Image (cartoon, helix red, strand yellow):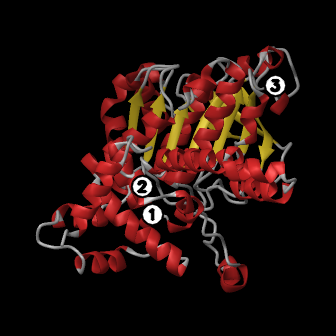
């Protein structure tokens, strides 16, 4: 009597074409079924074991689909492991099958595998409208059948969010730390944004014309994030990616912010003092600031995901805050969206928001105003309508704070700056905060 794998091998030989998925995608799909069963239920009904070329994938997916069909749930790894152990013989590739069952999803592959499966399942579902059954239904006027085909196809979606079960969990909302606040480095602004500072999974964007101080603000964000706030926000690990300045110049600006009132040009003359300041920060907060320099108009969030994975695997380190200087210099991970600036910047913003959510981090970034807001004599403030290139990019952002400065404000001693809350998902908008910005020291302070 042929063993289980012999049967599957015969099935494989009977296939007339290659399966719809790649070699690595097959094992990733099996892992996804175990790790994200709520997603798999959306696409699993279209799958058949003989769509998979690798024998061990055929075997495991067959057991998953059998259990799914019989019990209407996706089984766990332990259930499938026990079931398959009882069916394999010593001639079967025992180790390969168990290795596949034990394989966990890599978080970097999940978005791509999800996208692959969704497009494949939608293609199969909508494709049924051209089937012989659909043609027969059309011929006899059975439009209800055709509507059912379309309705089922439209139900294919990513529904992996667990949600908040209100009546079981509402008491959590009474806890003081239910919202995980971070700091912008500016106490007044923190009070207005999210009633205590922005949170993880959110994006704060500075909106300003050239040479006002977007990059300086983000260096202030970096140092303030490492130190935390006097209001109780703890210090954070920070990753700062610069697409504009090189890493050394960016690090020098951060050093200026850390040294506070010492002009950048004079820092070498205060080497011992600055060293003590930085070493005290290092020991007091026990946090890290990593500065990475990447070329403009070449990098997307895919590069950031890869960097985060590398840092986690090689250094055991993952940031709490990511600073992107700045979003207008990034490209979309989907090259088809990079054909024009409006579409590119819109999708870059969406992908940055996805990065914040997927990595559970707070993201600071910046964007350029258009020419109408760049007039140094303009006494007004820049709002959402004055973002350069793409108004739609601001839909995905949680907080947009414009930086405003007239000629007279720039020439003041010290120079002045007005922060204007142009968008605020959680709190008041339209508020203005007066600040000073000292370009010699790179320090921004609220007045």
Residue 265: image location, x then y, percent:
44, 19
Residue 129: image location, x then y, percent:
71, 47
Using residue 387 as the reference point, say whether residue 98 is left or right of it: left
- Are the residues at dot 3 and dot 1 in contact (C-beta closer than 8 Å)? no
Q: Quadrant of residue 85?
A: bottom left
Looking at the image, residue 355 lies above or below residue 234: above
Query: In this view of the protein, which residue sits in the foreground, 447 or 404?
Result: 404
Residue 317: image location, x then y, percent:
33, 51
Cα–Cα gap, marks 3 and 1: 45 Å
Residue at image location 74% in from the left, 36% down from the top: 394
Nearer the camera: disc 3 or disc 1: 1
Disc with the residue nearer the chain's start (3 vs 1): 1
Query: Callout 2: 10 Å neighbours few (<14), some, many (20+)?
Result: many
Asked if one can make out residue 53 in the rendered structure from this viewpoint, the answer is no
Cα–Cα gap, marks 3 and 2: 44 Å
Query: In this view of the protein, which residue sits in the foreground, 396 or 287?
Result: 396
- Are the residues at dot 2 and dot 1 in contact (C-beta closer than 8 Å)? yes
Looking at the image, residue 397 lies above or below residue 438: below
Q: In the rendered structure, find residue 386 and report the number of the disc placed on it.
A: 3
Q: Quadrant of residue 213?
A: top right
Indicate the secondary structure of the residue bearing disc 3. Answer: helix
Q: Which residue is mark 2?
A: 29
Indicate the secondary structure of the residue bearing disc 1. Answer: helix
Q: Which residue is mark 1?
A: 33
Residue at image location 34% in from the left, 59% down from the top: 58
Cα–Cα gap, marks 2 and 1: 6 Å
């Amino acid at each position: 009597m042929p063993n289980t794998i012999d049967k599957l091998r015969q099935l494989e030989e009977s296939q007339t074409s290659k399966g719809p998925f790649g070699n690595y995608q097959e094992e990733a799909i099996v892992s996804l079924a175990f790790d994200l069963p709520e997603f798999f239920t959306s696409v699993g009904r279209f799958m058949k074991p003989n769509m998979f070329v690798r024998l061990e994938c055929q075997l495991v997916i067959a057991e998953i689909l059998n259990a799914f069909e019989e019990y209407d749930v996706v089984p766990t790894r332990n259930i499938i492991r026990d079931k398959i152990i009882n069916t394999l013989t010593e001639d079967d590739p025992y180790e390969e099958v168990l290795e596949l069952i034990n394989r966990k999803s890599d978080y970097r592959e999940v978005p791509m595998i999800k996208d692959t499966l969704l497009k494949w399942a939608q293609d199969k579902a909508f494709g049924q409208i051209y089937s012989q059954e659909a043609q027969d239904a059309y011929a006899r006027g059975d439009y209800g059948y055709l509507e059912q085909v379309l309705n089922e196809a439209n139900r294919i979606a990513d529904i992996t969010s667990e949600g908040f079960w209100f009546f079981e969990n509402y008491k959590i909302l009474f806890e003081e730390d239910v919202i995980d606040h971070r700091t912008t480095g500016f106490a007044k602004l923190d009070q207005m944004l999210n009633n205590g500072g922005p949170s993880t999974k959110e994006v704060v964007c500075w909106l300003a014309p050239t040479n006002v101080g977007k990059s300086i603000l983000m260096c202030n964000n970096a140092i303030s994030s490492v130190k935390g706030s006097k209001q109780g926000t703890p210090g954070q690990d920070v990753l700062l990616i610069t697409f504009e300045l090189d890493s050394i110049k960016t690090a020098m600006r951060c050093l200026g912010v850390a040294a506070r009132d010492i002009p950048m040009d004079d820092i070498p003359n205060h080497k011992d003092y600055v060293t003590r300041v930085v070493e005290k920060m290092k020991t007091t907060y026990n946090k890290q600031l990593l500065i990475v320099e990447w070329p403009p108009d070449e990098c997307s969030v895919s590069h950031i995901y890869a960097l985060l994975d590398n840092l986690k695997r090689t250094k055991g380190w993952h940031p709490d805050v990511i600073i992107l200087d700045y979003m207008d210099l990034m490209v979309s991970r989907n090259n088809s969206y990079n054909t024009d600036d409006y579409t590119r910047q819109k999708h870059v913003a969406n992908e940055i928001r996805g990065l914040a959510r997927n990595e559970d981090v707070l993201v600071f970034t910046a964007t350029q105003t258009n020419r109408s807001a760049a007039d140094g004599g303009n006494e007004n403030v820049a709002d959402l309508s004055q973002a350069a290139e793409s108004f739609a990019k601001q839909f995905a952002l949680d907080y947009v704070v414009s930086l405003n400065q007239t000629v007279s404000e720039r020439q003041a001693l010290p120079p002045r700056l007005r922060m204007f809350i142009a968008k605020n998902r959680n709190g008041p908008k339209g508020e203005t905060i007066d600040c000073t910005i000292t370009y010699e020291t790179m320090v921004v302070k609220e007045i």
